[in-house]
Image (cartoon, grey):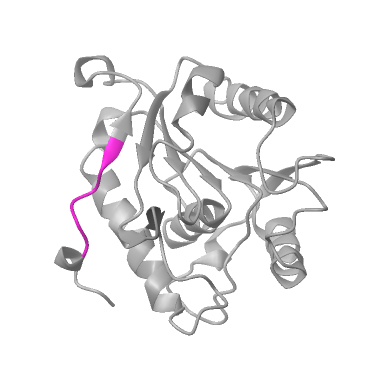
Amino acid sequence: MMPADAFPAPVVLWSKSEADRAGKPLLILLHGHGANEQDLFSLAELLPADFVVAAVRAPIATGPGFTWFPRTASIDYTLDAVMDASSYVLDWLDSVKANHPSVTLLGFSMGMAMATTMLRQRPADFAAVVGLSGFVVDAGPDTSFRDAQLDGTVPMFWGRDQQDPVITQDKIEFTMGWVRRHVKLTKVLYAGMWHGINQQEIGHVSEFLTHEVLNGRK
């Protein structure tokens, strides 16, 4: 595992000033490979205003942007690298989560792999997860992924296009099996979206967040 100080200090873009964050549910945005914290931030104004949105930059520079871990087809890819990235965000989250009644994760592409990895490492910590055009990491028998503690009660939205040219079929098949066993799944397919996000999907995500997180709070 990589030491905590091997990564830079987290760069986080917030939708509200510090004075306006306390007591509001937190929604964390996790971008895809080669992007940055600004990539998904425009979604904040399209999602329920009750949330405080925090977009987190991945820690590893790659090309013009950043990545959470090496691509799975890369020789440098390891499960340890995935866990290091997850711990990077979880350590930051530990410094702010006391201000919020709930935490929800939204990840695009590799960011969905991050969001679901964070859930699998801390199964009781998140109100819901949104995965857009992404996948779940195959962790094999690794015991730091606490899948056995995910009993199908955490709500998860998974949106994708069946013609997505980026996420390979083996990843889709593993993800399909995993979500059916471990989360309370809302799955929607979109035609003509390819590897992206469209307005219809964001409308569905807003409805999901309102129903499962805002209206679901006890």
Q: Quadrant of residue 55?
A: top left
Mainly helix, strand or loop, the magenta region?
A: loop
- Range shown magenta: 7-12
Residue 14 at x, y percent in the picture:
31, 28
Which residue is situated farthest in the left direction here?
5
Give the side of residue 209 with respect to residue 186, left or right: left
Was residue 150 drawn as part of the magenta stretch in this picture? no
Q: Please say whether residue 63 is visible from this viewpoint.
A: yes
Q: Quadrant of residue 128?
A: top right
Identify which residue is drawn at 53% across, 57% down: 110
Residue situated in front as seen by the camera: 182 or 76? 76
Was residue 8 drawn as part of the magenta stretch in this picture? yes
Residue 77 at x, y percent in the picture:
46, 78
Identify which residue is drawn at 24% across, 37% down: 96
State whether residue 139 is above or below residue 50.
below
Q: Dividing the image into 4 quarters, which one contains the N terminus? A: bottom left
Identify which residue is drawn at 78% across, 47% down: 161
State whether residue 36 is above or below residue 204.
below
Give the side of residue 20 with respect to residue 171, left or right: left
Residue situated in front as seen by the camera: 173 or 163? 163
State whether residue 183 is above or below residue 40.
below
Identify which residue is drawn at 18% across, 51% down: 9
Residue 132 at x, y percent in the picture:
63, 45
Q: Please say whether residue 218 is visible from this viewpoint.
A: no
